[in-house]
Amino acid sequence: MLVLNLSCNREHRFEGWFGSADDFEAQLGRGLVGCPVCASTEVQRLPSAPRLNVSHLRGPAAEPKPAQSPVDPQQQLQQAALQAVQQLLARTEDVGERFAEEARRIHYGEVEQRGIRGRASREEAVALADEGIAVMALAVPESLKGTLQ
């Protein structure tokens, strides 16, 4: 298994796992490697140090120290944002194009209160806000819209 550090053209950094370097190149060439944040397929491989298992060449090993990777604030922020969106998707019901209608039904007590998500036009969102119904636009990365593997 080959683990690569990758970056898209918007500088989102992520990790990819491939069977081999040839497998990575083939998938990249067919546009199958995409950024989990913005879905861009303009991806490049970042430099990384290979890990070689040569412990058998050394003498008895000392107690291993936990791996310490450099802290990348941008990557931490991206990860936190993706986790927040994943939690929101898991805890809400997708009502699709019926969002405005369902939000009104919940607001006026016609149906049980619950968390919903869906799609609404700008005009529908403004009308909901005028009625005192709080809504929030949220851009969901393409990678989270389908089934995660």
Image: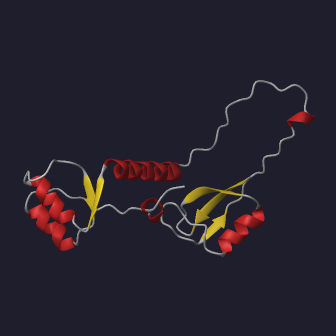
The quarter in which the C terminus is drawn is: bottom right
Q: Is residue 116 left or right of residue 87?
A: left
| Residue 93 or residue 13, whichever sits in front | 93
| Residue 33 or residue 90, whichever sits in front | 90
Q: Position of residue 112 (x, y in %)?
A: 15, 48
Q: How is the image coloured?
A: secondary structure
| Residue 63 or residue 146, whichever sits in front | 146
Please identify the residue farthest to the front as the structure is shown. Answer: 111
In the rendered image, which quarter is residue 28 located in?
Answer: bottom right
In the rendered image, which quarter is residue 71 located in?
Answer: top right
Q: Position of residue 147 (x, y in %)?
A: 47, 58
Please identify the residue farthest to the bottom as the structure is shown. Answer: 30
Q: Is residue 60 left or right of residue 2?
A: right
* Residue displayed at 12% across by 57% down: 105
64 over 70 or under it: above or below: above
* Residue displayed at 76% across by 63% down: 21
Q: Is residue 61 left or right of residue 77?
A: right
Q: Position of residue 42 (x, y in %)?
A: 59, 72
* Residue displayed at 56% across by 66% down: 34
* Residue displayed at 29% across by 54% down: 93
Q: Position of residue 7 (x, y in %)?
A: 60, 62
How many numbered marks does the figure carry? 0
